[in-house]
Amino acid sequence: MEALQQEADIHPRSMRDPSVRERRRAMLSLPHVAPLTAFVAGLRRRASVEVPDFDPLDGGTEARILFLFEKPGPMTARDGSRSRSGSGFISRDNDDPTAEATFNFMIQARIPRKLTVTWNVIPWWNGTRKVTASELREGVECIRELTTLLPKLRVVVLVGDKAAKARPYLEMTGLALFASAHPSPLVRASWIDRWKAIPLEWAKAAQFVE
């Protein structure tokens, strides 16, 4: 029954439903995600910023591919935007167009969800999408901590130009690095060819770990 409910909760924008969000929060202590939940809790204690939790329906500590995005948006925060509630998770199931595109691109790239974990170079939402130099430095240190919690990690996909700024550190880890454009509406409107190429780039990462 529980497995059937989880399957029913997996679809684009499902996190708009409060009951889906509640079921997801109830999973945060599962063995594959508990170390990541503790990691997030530690980040929250460092500063007065909102850090979304990892999605328990992703691979957690079993993941082989880290999708490293840029910065959480308002729909990862529980307060959400002015018109909608957020989820409190970094999730492809969030109620926004970038998350929806991510969900669909993962399917097109044929990447099993359990192989993946999603994070951001800047791990917190502080009310603005702007990124400062000091935030980038702090974010890279957080990536350093995160990779120690992912023993099966083999690949990092840098999603977007800001995420690419973490490349110098990641080149020293021995992990395979791939890159793509960001699946945001802005990229789709301005660089449609780059946007359409995203699942092709992500598929290369999946082929690497097969």
Image (cartoon, grey):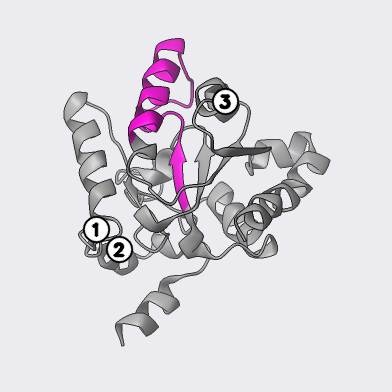
Instruction: Find residue 80 and report its horizontal and vertical position in percent.
Output: 36, 44
Residue at the disc numbered 2: 24
In the image, farthest residue toward the top: 133
> Cβ–Cβ below 8 Å for labels 2 and 1?
yes
**Screen quadrant of the C terminus:** bottom right
Residue at the disc numbered 3: 167
At horizontal 42% and vertical 28% (from top left) the residue drawn is 122
Judging from the image, what secondary structure is the residue with disc 2 in? helix
Judging from the image, what secondary structure is the residue with disc 1 in? loop
Q: Label 3 sits on what residue type?
A: Arg
In the image, farthest residue toward the right: 193
In the image, farthest residue toward the left: 45
Q: Residues within 10 Å of mark 3 (few under 14, many from 20)?
A: some
Measured in 3D between alpha carbons, the distance from the residue under mark 3 to the one under mark 1, in whole angstroms, is 29 Å
Relative side of 1 to 26, left or right: right
Residue 142 lies, with reference to residue 155, above or below; the image says above
Residue 15 location, quadrant:
bottom left
Q: Label 1 sits on what residue type?
A: Leu
Q: Nearer the viewer, residue 65 or 136?
A: 65
Name the N-terminal-most of marks 3 and 2.
2
At horizontal 43% and vertical 77% (from top left) the residue drawn is 7
Residue at the disc numbered 1: 28
> Cβ–Cβ below 8 Å for labels 3 and 1?
no
Q: Nearer the viewer, mark 2 or mark 1?
A: 1
At horizontal 83% and vertical 42% (from top left) the residue drawn is 193
Residue 136 lies within the magenta run: yes
Q: Label 2 sits on what residue type?
A: Arg
Q: Which residues are magenta?
A: 117-145
